[in-house]
Image: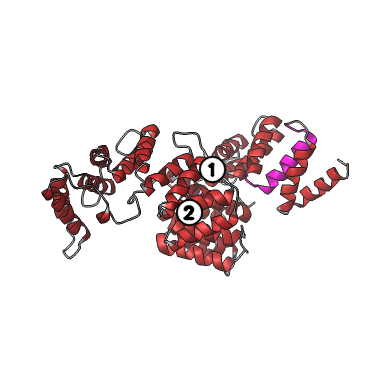
Amino acid sequence: MHILESWERSLATAAQSALLLVFVIVLSACAGTPRSKNRHDSSTASASAVAQYKLGLVYYQGSGVTKNYSRAIRLFQESAYQGYAPAEEELGLLYNNGEGVKQDYAKAAHWYRKAAIQGYAEAQDHLGALYTNGNGVKQDYATAIGWFRKSAAQGCAKALLDLGITYDNGYGVKQDYKRAAYWYKRAVDKGSVYAMTNLGDLYFHGNGVERNYARALELYREGAAAGDDFAMQALGLLYENGDGVTQSYVKALRWYRKAIATGNNLLAMNALGLMYEYGRGVPQDTDKAMALYKKAAALGSAAGYTNVGEMYANGHGVKKDPKAAMRWYEKSMHIGTDAVAYNNIGILYFYGLGVKKSQSTGARYFLKAAQMGYSGAQLRVGRLYLNGTGLPRDPRKAFVWIKKAAEQGNAYAENELGLMYKKGLGTSANRAQAIAWLKKAAAQGIKKARHSLDAIQQGGT
């Protein structure tokens, strides 16, 4: 049996895209400008501190001289010891990124804090990022938000973006898409490229704003034009699935390839691999698919490991080998949180493929994947609770999980949820809800939903 069907893997890719479009906080200048042009009131700084800082930038960038990190760091330190905030921020960046020095988040936090206390907006934002990720300091979302707000109050586009990310993901606050949209919009007004992509995602899914495919497409295009590989990948996904645009595999391929060429985008690598594996818009080529998956895996993509495992599980381009599939899935679990890997290990255990059969063990993996938000696993868990297989029979829990999957647009879950409302299974019978969910499923091509809908509307059972 196939571990995961092609359509399901596309849904998983879309889910990964949604998650990664609100990616981990990155470090960049407040207004997207080179740091050599950052503004700071130097009227109270000594002339020597300012001169040392500027000369340090010359050596750091190699502007008219040979690039020399050691010389640049000494000059930044001399300036920073005199309390010049831009130099303190610069040292924070160097320690944060490990440029010319051994990476040391604690030292980065030390220098960011010195500049942040002086009101330097960029340092305030970067210090907030360290608190968000728990790098060099104890993770503390409340403190992070405090620094982001101080920076945002000065108009720092990066801080506005990070506040959007905070509410988008619910980092230390209740997840609030409306607030996320508010902060993303302010960041876009300041020219934040990443905010364009994240705001586009909210418009595409209708999270916190009225769903608007045209606006999402516009924002993704603006982000792509500014060089954001995540926006390019998002455009590829839109064209591949025909979401809000005329489906075009040719355009999807072009955008995925641009995303890979621009930023080695791991989502795009996996998506392009799927197109080669199943021959969507290109001649089927499992060798190219495998190469793309392995490249993504080598660069740290959990989904890349999962997709290689899928090829072994399904026997696509390689001899079917459930044990090899298990090894790749386990690698995926060790480096990331790819719900599909948990789901697929569940399938191996549930059906005894390459391992001793254990429905209860399989169910535990399905439940983990469902808790991580994967709709395919949520539907499976619902079915197990409904049938009492691998999990104790519990129609109410079945209803809860199937509803979660349906709310993510899983067509099969929409159909089953409609039937549960129709029969009053795990919930009170509700004819209106039954019709609504069956209509959703029928619109996605589920023929059984169409038949059930006709029966209900004709007064049958």
Circle 1 SS class: helix
User: What kind of residue is marked 2?
Assistant: Thr
- Badge 2: few (under 14), some or many (20 or more) residues near its Cα, within 10 Å? many
Residue 49: mark: none
Q: Which residue is mark 1?
A: 342
Q: Quadrant of residue 393?
A: top right
The number of discs equals 2
Regarding residue 340, the answer to whether it shows in the image is yes
Residue 402 image offset from top left, x and y in percent:
67, 39
Q: Which residue was labeled with disc 2?
A: 197
| Residue 422 shown in magenta | yes
Neighbour tally class for label 1: few under 14, some 14-19, many 20 plus, Cα within 10 Å: many
Give the camera-side residue of 309 and 146.
Answer: 146
In this view, 119 is above or below 318:
above
Tell me where residue 44 sits by quadrant: top left
**Where does the image place residue 36, in percent across and percent down from the top left?**
25, 55
Q: Looking at the picture, does residue 273 appear above or below residue 184?
A: below
| 297 within the magenta span | no
Q: Is residue 22 left or right of residue 71?
A: right
Q: Using residue 69 as the reference point, say whether residue 169 is left or right of it.
A: right
In x, y percent, where is residue 177?
53, 41
